[in-house]
Amino acid sequence: RALDAGCGHGAETLWLAARGWTITGVDFSASALDHGRSVAAALGVADRVRWVQADLGAWTPPIAAYDLVVSLYV
């Protein structure tokens, strides 16, 4: 399981999902997450991605929930 903190449109989220990861993408932008959802559906990986709209300054991930955390361009 992976977490993409500050995922934006979800480029890394989608890349990891396409390679078999179950991933949570977190970002504050609803429009960016909507874009990510659309692309995930088109790629056939929507079932591997959970999208969360949240501010990373306030959002706390569950303890020990992820094996990989990426945070690029935050």
Image (cartoon, rainbow, N blue to C red):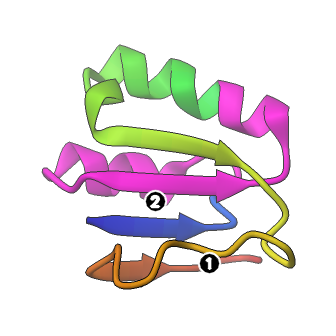
Amino acid at dot 1: Leu
Disc 1 crowd, CA 10 A, few/some/many (<14, 14-19, 20+): few
Whole-angstrom CA distance, mark 1 to mark 2, is 9 Å
Nearer the observer, 67 or 6? 67
| Image quadrant in which you'd find residue 53 | top right
Residue in view at x 16 percent, y 52 percent: 19
Q: Is residue 57 or residue 70 the one in the foreground?
A: 57
Tell me the element at label 1.
loop
Locate the N terminus by quadrant: bottom left
- Is the residue marked by circle 2 packed among few (<14), some (14-19), or many (20+) residues within 10 Å? some
Please report the residue visible at 35 percent of the width from the left and 84 percent of the height from the top: 64
The furthest residue to the left:
20
> Residue 28's spot in the image, x, y percent?
84, 52
Is residue 56 depicted above or below 47 in this figure? below
Where's residue 39, x and y in %?
Answer: 48, 25
Span highlighted in magenta in the image: 8-34
- The residue indicated by pointer 1 is 72
Question: Where, by quadrant of the figure, is residue 16 drawn?
Answer: bottom left
Which residue is pictured at 33% across the width and 76% down the height? Answer: 66
Quarter of the rendering occupied by the C terminus: bottom right
The label number, if any, that marks residue 36 in the structure image: none
Q: Where is residue 55 drawn, in percent x and y?
A: 85, 63
Q: Secondary structure at mark 2?
A: helix
Does the magenta portion include 19? yes
Q: Position of residue 67 (x, y in %)?
A: 26, 81
Which mark is first along the chain, 2 or 1?
2
**In the shown orientation, is residue 27 left or right of residue 68?**
right
- Left/right placement of residue 59 relative to residue 11 reads right
**Badge 2 amino acid:** Glu
Which residue is disc 2 drawn over? Answer: 12
State yes or no: residue 72 in magenta: no
Q: Are marks 1 and 2 in contact (CB under 8 Å)?
A: yes
